[in-house]
Image: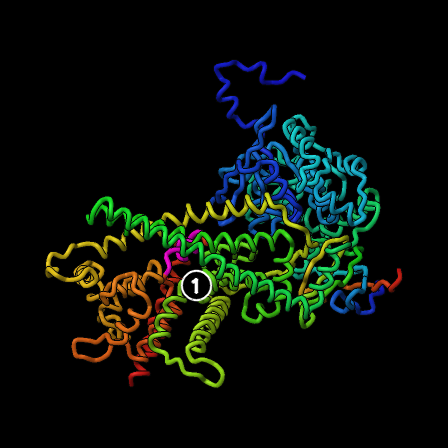
Amino acid sequence: MTKSTETRVPVNEITVAKRTDASIAVVGNPNSGKSTLFNRLTGLKQRIGNYPGVTVERHIGTLKTETATLELIDLPGTHSLSAHSLEEHIAVDVIFGRMEGTRAPDGILAVLDATNLYQGLFLVQQLVELELPMIVALTMTDAAEKSGIQIDTAELSALLGVPVYPIVATTGAGLNLLRSALADIKQVTPPRRIRVWPALSEAASQLAENASEPLRFAELERLLIDGATDSNQVIVGKLSDAARSKLAGVRSELFESEPPIARDARIRYAWVRGVLDKVQKSAPAYVSWRSRITDFVNRPVPGTIGLFLVMAIVFQAVFAWATPMMDAIDAGSSALGAAVFERLGDTAFSSLIADGVIAGVGSVVIFLPQIMILFLFIILLEDSGYLARAAYLMDRTMRSVGLSGQSIIPMISSFACAVPGIMATRVIPNRRDRIATIMAAPFMTCSARLPIYALLIAAFVPATNVGILNLQGLVLFGLYLFGIVMGILTALLMRKTTLRGPKPPFALMLPEFRSPNLQTVGIQLLGRAKVFLKRAGTVIFAVAVIIWALAYFPRSDEIPAGLDANSAAAVQMEQSWLGRAGKVIEPVFEPLGWDWRVSSAVIAGFPAREVVIAVLGTVYAVGDDADEGTLSTRLKSATRPDGSKVFTLPMVIGLLIFYACCLQCVATLAIIRRETNTWRWPIFAWTYMTVIGYVGALLAFQLGSA
Amino acid sequence: MATNGSTLATLKRGQKGIIRAVNAADPQVQRLMVLGLVEGTEVEHASSAIGGDPMEFRLFGCGISLRQEHARHFHVAPVAAGD
């Protein structure tokens, strides 16, 4: 065989080498091992983006073989070519070449799970009708073998009219053959249509004769089954007027009174059962450790207890394992900042670098350990098949608050940090559910709220015992509970108002347990980290620099000589834009019992709530590294000009409520923007939570002081 | 179509049945049919969550969980044990 490269002109070599020889859509059921195979084939040569206008991620990877450079598009998992969810819609649009900004595929790599041929063949049969060059990768052949399933690959290939390559994506067996087959995909003869449903094919042929330009058979069949839906308008537009007027009649003749999707599913699955009889020797059985685990988690009570145990471990890990790393990042950025001052002296520039840039970058990077740890667990749980089971077990409980089982992991994760929690909502397929969960998540008491709670509780709640319980601990517990209740009420409220809609179809695939592939886990984890640093990082960083400038300028020249550094910093803070803003805004917060100092600390805390402690430290002239003891003493003795105490109990309770509610976290806002793809939701969440926090603090102070 | 009023929702844990008829008017039920819950397919009730809802069914080696309200729309002919 002559390689095509030999005939190329040298001048063009560079462009030729960069050219993509073929674009291949990777299509398969959810959990079919599609992403594992995609990662195996493309490794780190992947680009993650978004499809235009939606939040579904687009994964495109490059596969270089000896003879070709291929572009692989990892499509969202789908069960059928009739699109029910957003993900499926996108998959179908890309396959039909209707997706803006995405090349129409030259060929299809269909991923067929050997342990689930039943659902897999339902999709593959529809793909065959696309009349595109196609290759089937039969994955999980090792697991199938262990379960006692024997598949006659040759017979399967003959029945489908498509080459079938058995592979084990986890070990890489069979991948080389698949790679070289993919390189020559354009030479693969498109399969002949399988006559699964002659009446449908007949009707589609009739329409094809009446089209103004050649239409794909599969598209016409979809039009007949799904009707003139939005995404089918393109096809309707290509039909002649005569065909268009006949469409309704043809459909009613074809389906009579039955829902088209139902009849289509019944006929195609009947065909699938026929194929299974011929190619699959024994029915799949659950075996070995998998069956034991499955049996255990299938019993309702042990299963639910197990779920809580798993969640407790995840929560603990995110909380505890991340802390040393976060402390190290914190210490590292402080040391770096100090070094900058040492080298460059105390100038505006060095302050910008140290307090603005380094602290700003630090405030972004500090989230990374929690995100990485949480996502490590989520990816492990998802890839092992446990996440679906957790959603299944919790569905009833979560349904009572208007959500579904899939919301449980994001909600629990948000106790550590709402940022990874909100990123984790992508496991929720229903958009309304997903947004309601995103709105509820920031109410969960995150780890950044904890230092503020700890400071205020230690300073103002007496350490007495209530029965066997410590009052301080009780207050802390109450604040956690308060967050949960607020979150649930919010979700409930949203599902009843703006997000009202039909109950989401709850049909969850419960895959058999399997051990996750480490390479896939690693690639996914890196992808998540990159997405976070790129999208959220830019916003957080910009805001950190702005807050720095507000606290640094204008410089005060009235600092009396002989003042110690801490007091000088306090004077500067009072003079800065931030301090002035605190004074300007004081009347707004006056009804809450706050003075200008608390007000400026709260303003400074809007980008990142944990900053409030450092700012309080500065305005109360104890230095921003002050330990809790010094600061709480200072807070306790803080007075207004008239001598009355600032931090009264009602005011402190109000402040705690304010912090429990308020969305003081730019990272969360940035991630809500990213995950909902609109500014509407972050703006709404911020306003809603701020208003609730304000009203709560107002009520606490006014009622408490009355 | 001798289903004796049995539906997926009335199958006991571990019991198998063959789907004989589906009330497919509800789009959510149609969605379940796309997942393979169609007439002629044998299904086993594998487990249920606390309170018996949702339920897990297995067909040809894949597990699908559905809520009782949807399971009721699938009429089944129970398969006697030992078949």
Q: Is residue A74 above or below residue A255?
A: above
Q: Inspect this view and state whether residue A604 appears.
A: no
Number of residues whose C-alpha sits closer than 10 Å to that of mark 1, classed few (under 14), some (14–19) or many (20 or more): some
Q: Is residue A536 above or below residue A390?
A: above
**Residue A366 coordinates in the image, percent (x, y):** 41, 53
Q: Residue furthest right?
A: B82
Which chain does the numbered disc 1 sit on? A
Mark 1, residue position: A447
**Residue A271 coordinates in the image, percent (x, y):** 78, 46
What's the residue at 25%, 62% (across, down)?
A623
**Residue A527 coordinates in the image, percent (x, y):** 50, 45
Q: Which quadrant of the structure image shows residue A687?
A: bottom left
A483 magenta-colored? no
Q: Inspect this view and state whether residue A143 appears.
A: yes
Q: Is residue A453 above or below residue A537?
A: below
| Residue nearest the viewer, comparing A346 with A382 | A346
A666 magenta-colored? yes
Left/right of residue A599 with respect to residue A658 in the rendered view: left
| Residue nearest the viewer, comparing A109 with A39 | A39
**Residue A244 coordinates in the image, percent (x, y):** 61, 43
What's the residue at 58%, 64% (across, down)?
A404
Q: Which quadrant holds the C terminus of chain A?
A: bottom left
What's the residue at 28%, 75% (across, down)?
A592
Give the residue type that dot 1 points to.
Answer: Ser
Q: How many marks?
A: 1
Q: Is residue A150 above or below residue A496?
A: above
Q: Which quadrant of the structure image shows residue A604?
A: bottom left
Secondary structure found at label 1: loop
| Residue nearest the viewer, comparing B1 with A596 | A596
What's the residue at 59%, 25% (across, down)?
A68
Segment colored magenta: A665-675
Left/right of residue A239 with respect to residue A366 in the rendered view: right
